[in-house]
Amino acid sequence: MTIREETEADFVEIVVLTRAAFGGDYEVELIEKLRAAGLMILSLVAVDGGSTVGHIFFSELAVEVDGRRVKAAALAPMAVRPDRQRQGIGSKLIETGLESLRNHGYEAVIVLGHPNYYPRFGFSPALTAFLTAPFNGKAFMGLELVPGSLSGQKGSVTYPKVFGA
């Protein structure tokens, strides 16, 4: 299996894969709107045997902590083909994506995701609990790529309008 940046030739398979993984079009439309708005930071595909089996998308996200801007990304969505789930593909996509973001100077990543899955990568709802945002609870998590980047007393997360949040 190879993890690499998406190309335009991958778009159709990403749509099919995402629709199959989520059972609808919201995530497909989100990807298309984020691309069109120029908010994409990183989009990776997992390819095995010439077929796209996984995809992860990171986009710009406005985060402020104690009056300072945090260079942050939203992780959304991530999809693995249903017949290939639970084989480590999602983990490889997340690990590769986080390393790339670190290398490009990003300080934090925010995800609204499964509270039993994302903590294994260091995501924690404790890091976002003090942030004013359209989401809260155990599924709304942050990860510091730079230690202390989400530490503070008061802050906010403002999602781009395309999220519909």
Image (spheres, rainbow, N blue to C red):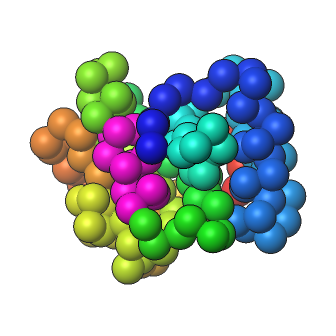
**As drawn, 127 above or below 49:** below
Quadrant, the N terminus:
top left
Q: Which residues are magenta?
A: 88-98
Image-quadrant location for residue 47: top right
Answer whether residue 12 is magenta in the image. no
Residue nearest the observer in this picture, 38 or 128 = 38
Give the image location of residue 69, x and y in percent: 37, 30
Looking at the image, which residue is at 75% across and 24% down?
Answer: 9
In the figure, is residue 142 to the left or right of 133? left
- Marks counted in the figure total 0
Residue 39 seen in the current view: yes
Quadrant, the C terminus:
bottom right
Looking at the image, which residue is at 26% across and 67% down?
Answer: 120
Answer whether residue 97 is magenta in the image. yes
Going by the picture, which residue comes out furthest to the left? 147
Residue nearest the observer in this picture, 137 or 86 = 86
Give the image location of residue 92, x and y in percent: 37, 50
In the figure, is residue 119 to the left or right of 87? left
Secondary structure of the magenta portion, mostly?
helix
**As drawn, 48 above or below 129:** above
In the figure, is residue 61 to the left or right of 40? left
Residue 37 seen in the current view: no
**As drawn, 17 above or below 70:** below
Looking at the image, which residue is at 37% across and 57% down?
Answer: 91
Give the image location of residue 19, x and y in percent: 80, 59
Give the image location of residue 89, x and y in percent: 45, 56
Looking at the image, which residue is at 70% across and 65% down?
Answer: 21
In the figure, is residue 124 to the left or right of 111? left
Going by the picture, which residue comes out furthest to the front? 49
